[in-house]
Image: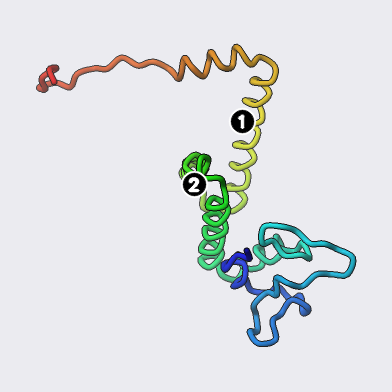
């Protein structure tokens, strides 16, 4: 199924992609000769990144709207048993990136997040028992201090 968000993505000066009846909209059915194209609603000419970059430069708010729609669509395609975890992961990513307004800073933070996950993955591969024990143990512990003037009874 072709993404409605991608259908609304403006063309970035690639004349063959314009829909004759709807100027400015991308023709997602266009296939360059000799290529099968890409799956999951991506354009068959492989220029999605350029289109999204061009859109960000012209209209950052529309870029945000379309990117959120694309992410939502991808999460909805997950099997039902993995969907909640996918949405949770996306919320963590969004929360972490919300501190960065500059696109380069956001990208740098995404690279940091990637390497953190890659290193965690390597730890699991190299020592699965130790990684499982560390995960089961959880994070750091903290002492709960009662606030002054409040009863410690529940």
Residue shown at the point (17%, 22%) measured from the top left: 147
Above or below, 7 against 70 in this view is below
Q: Residues within 10 Å of mark 2 (few under 14, many from 20)?
A: few
Residue shown at the point (35%, 16%) measured from the top left: 142
| Residue 52: percent from left, percent from top | 65, 63
The CA distance from mark 1 to mark 2 is 16 Å
Residue shown at the point (51%, 48%) measured from the top left: 100
Instruction: Look at mark 2 in the image and give the residue it sits on.
Output: 94
The residue most toward the bottom is: 21
Is 146 situated left or right of 15 in this image?
Answer: left
The foreground one among 97 and 139 is 139
Locate the C terminus and report the quarter of the image it occupies: top left
Residue shown at the point (62%, 63%) measured from the top left: 1
- Look at the numbered disc 1 and give the secondary structure of its residue: helix
Instruction: Look at mark 1 in the image and give the residue it sits on.
Output: 116
The foreground one among 38 and 138 is 38
Picture quadrant of residue 63: bottom right
Q: Which mark is residue 99?
A: none
The foreground one among 79 and 49 is 79
Q: Residues within 10 Å of mark 1 (few under 14, many from 20)?
A: few
| Residue 84: percent from left, percent from top | 47, 42
| Residue 95: percent from left, percent from top | 46, 44
Picture quadrant of residue 108: top right
């Amino acid at each position: 199924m072709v993404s409605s968000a991608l259908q609304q993505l403006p063309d970035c000066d690639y004349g063959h992609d314009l829909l004759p009846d709807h100027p400015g909209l991308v023709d997602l059915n266009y296939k360059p000769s000799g290529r099968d194209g890409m799956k999951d609603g991506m354009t068959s000419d492989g220029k999605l990144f350029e289109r999204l970059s061009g859109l960000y430069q012209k209209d950052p708010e529309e870029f945000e709207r379309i990117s959120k729609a694309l992410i939502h669509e991808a999460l909805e395609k997950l099997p039902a048993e993995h969907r909640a975890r996918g949405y949770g992961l996306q919320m963590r990513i969004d929360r972490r990136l919300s501190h960065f307004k500059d696109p380069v800073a956001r990208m740098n933070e995404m690279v940091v997040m990637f390497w953190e996950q890659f290193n965690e993955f390597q730890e699991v591969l190299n020592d699965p028992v130790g990684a499982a024990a560390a995960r089961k143990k959880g994070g750091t512990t903290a002492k709960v201090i009662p606030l002054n003037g409040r009863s410690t009874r529940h």
